[in-house]
Amino acid sequence: MPDDICCSKAPLLVQFAYHTGSGEAKLLAEYLHAALNDDPSVPGLRIPTLFMPETDPNDVPEPKLATEADRVLVVALADDHLAAHAHRPTRSGRTWADYMVQIRGLCDQQNTDNRFMPVQLTQHAWPIDPRLADLNFLCAWAIDDKQEQQRSIGSRIIHLALRLLQSRASPDDAPPLTIFISHAKLDIDTEPCVVKSLLAYLTVNQPQKIWFDSGDIEVGSRFAKEIEDGVKDAALLAVLTDSYSSRSWCRREVLLAKHFQRPVVVVDAVQEREVRSFPYVGNVPVVRWKGDVQEVIDALLREALRQAYAEENLKKRRRAGEVVLPTVPELLTLVYRDRESVVLYPDPPLGPEELAVVERTCIRVHTPLQRHAQERDLTGKSLVVAISASPAEDISRFGLRSVHLEATLLEISRYLLISGIRLAYGGHLGADGYTVRLANLLRDPVIEHLRGDRTESDVDCAPQIVNYLPWPLFESLHSQARIGALVKVIPCPRPDDVDEALDPLFTDPILCEVPVDNAIRRLAWARGLTEMRCRQVAEVNARVALGGRIGYGYRGRIPGVLEEILLSIDANQPVYLIGAYGGCAHLVCEALNGRLQPELTWDHHRAIPYSAELHDLYTERDIVWEDYDAIFQRLQDEGFGSLCNGLQPDENEELAVTRSTERIIELILSGLQNVYADTEGD
């Protein structure tokens, strides 16, 4: 089995810079993140992003560029908040003006492909500091409509990101994107006159070059050759009108664009009907024409960026003999290839209904993570891996948001399932719970198909997700029915040392939600959660942990993810700690490296309601209470070797800090393969 785990960087990352006290700048950064990232469950644009680290509100962070990408585009969001605080002294002596100047300097260093893009959000936000007066800020403040302002900034970011990905000495040397407008002349003057609207808008507003067939062909040139050359280096905008599919040159232009692997977006402007739709105009983004030209251009720019990013990322990961295809494969893009070809295309994988057609070509197709997961096929091992995850209050300290954690969690779950592993999780079944999201993921026929043919044994037919419900968590029958047969729900019984004598609500089974509003009820929750976690550890084979609440809100003796990690370590189970998302997983990574964080001390946790009383109750009842000093000491003494996860020390160090979802999945799967390579399933 080839071991192709690589530490290659992402082609591009967008890093946002703004005053951490500005609520508007934060919201704008979150909007821009969403503009650069589609739903991870479908093929689409996914550009890594990094927010400002929010540490000390009275200080300025140290200027740093992200290190996990070949190119970093820093988008500086300058508003009144930043301008007003630009030169105020801070604890470190660094001002916000210094931060912006220094981060700009890092981008401008020689031998880098980074770029600094300042955006002026308010009238007085330029130039922030005289040292930045030579820069041309994007003048977004002049756009009154907030929604239009956001969209305009997003478009400029996508355009500049696309330039950065083009193979030139400098992004300034890269040519503007050429837009090839493929259209039926028969419909040019027919309402709603889409082509005329596009041309009028692009001529005035856009920095892109426009290729508009006959008007762009030199007199005396060969028409077919010029059309081919025009498509070869362009992004094709197919204006689908009633006559489009009946025109030979329109069909040929689409075929040429797909042959040359060019970005294609369809503008659906059919008014009455198509007698015969052109079958090869599919498998691309489609925008319904509503008179909004900018929406159409944005869709084309997004698709061009998606394809450029995917192509470079795939080239980094391809093996000898593999052919890179930056779009989802279809018959048209495969039929002219050698039957011995192996095609590498972007994640996520195709569904079984499409794969069944594609496989008729006898050409093998797969995505990087699909390849990695299937080469580390653990189906026959009957493994169950527990997922320990919850949003961490400190995730913003690391320049990330909950959406980053959720996307990573779902991708980890997807590829563990594809590898033939069952998942275990402990928690509630509400609409916002991970169990429901995992159940929805398991309904994806892609996962069932890629897991391979299932046998009729009890193990193979068992639900692929196991959810442990702790006493006294109350879940309605409706909640349990909603997740269906895909998830096995295991309600855990009431602990022996808790009953109605302590509180009338402590029934078994539980009949209603038990609030944590006094020490006895906190005790009941702590005992129930610990027993549930002990049972889960006894029934699973490994654990993956990321995030984990560390402050107010947890109901157990200690934070839940922390307790689950410690119990798995005590059981000598493989544990995979993903520390980049903060929370308990980060605290444990730090402790394993001998660095004590305040959140892993009794001084921090005694402030949680009823913690001191809970400690006394444990002492009175002679229940083991491991204090935080002891927890830190044993983690420090044992180090990463205590994780028993099949990874080398440097790999565990990497897993503790990497923000790359691909790399995280690669490390987890390889570690599991190393641990369980020679074992057989039950």
Image: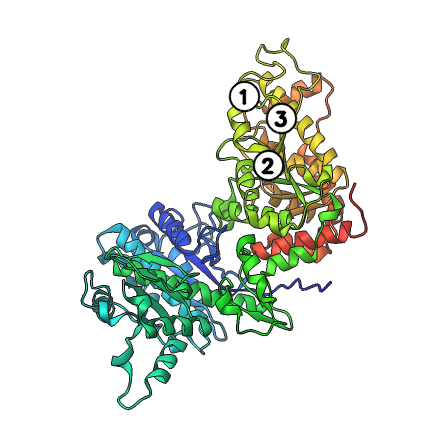
Q: Which mark is residue 280?
A: none
Viewer-nearest of discs 3 and 1: 3
The amino acid on which the numbered mark 2 sits, given as a three-letter code, is Leu
Viewer-nearest of discs 2 and 1: 2
Can residue 349 be seen here? The reply is yes
Left or right: 131, with 71 as reference point: left
Q: Which mark is residue 470?
A: 3
> For the residue carrying disc 2, how many other residues have a C-alpha within 10 Å: few (<14), some (14-19), or many (20+)?
some
- Whole-percent x and y of residue 289? 27, 57
- Whole-percent x and y of residue 125? 28, 57
Q: Which mark is residue 486?
A: 2
Near-viewer residue (478 or 396): 478
Q: Give the CA distance from mark 2 to mark 3.
A: 20 Å
Image point (58%, 38%), residue name:
599
Q: Which mark is residue 516?
A: 1
Q: Give the CA distance from mark 3 to mark 1.
A: 15 Å
**Which structural element holds mark 2?**
helix
**Which structural element holds mark 3?**
loop
Left or right: 542, with 599 as reference point: right
Image point (58%, 27%), residue name:
555
N-term mark: 2 or 3? 3
- Whole-percent x and y of residue 382? 73, 43
Compared with 630, 172 (above or below) is below
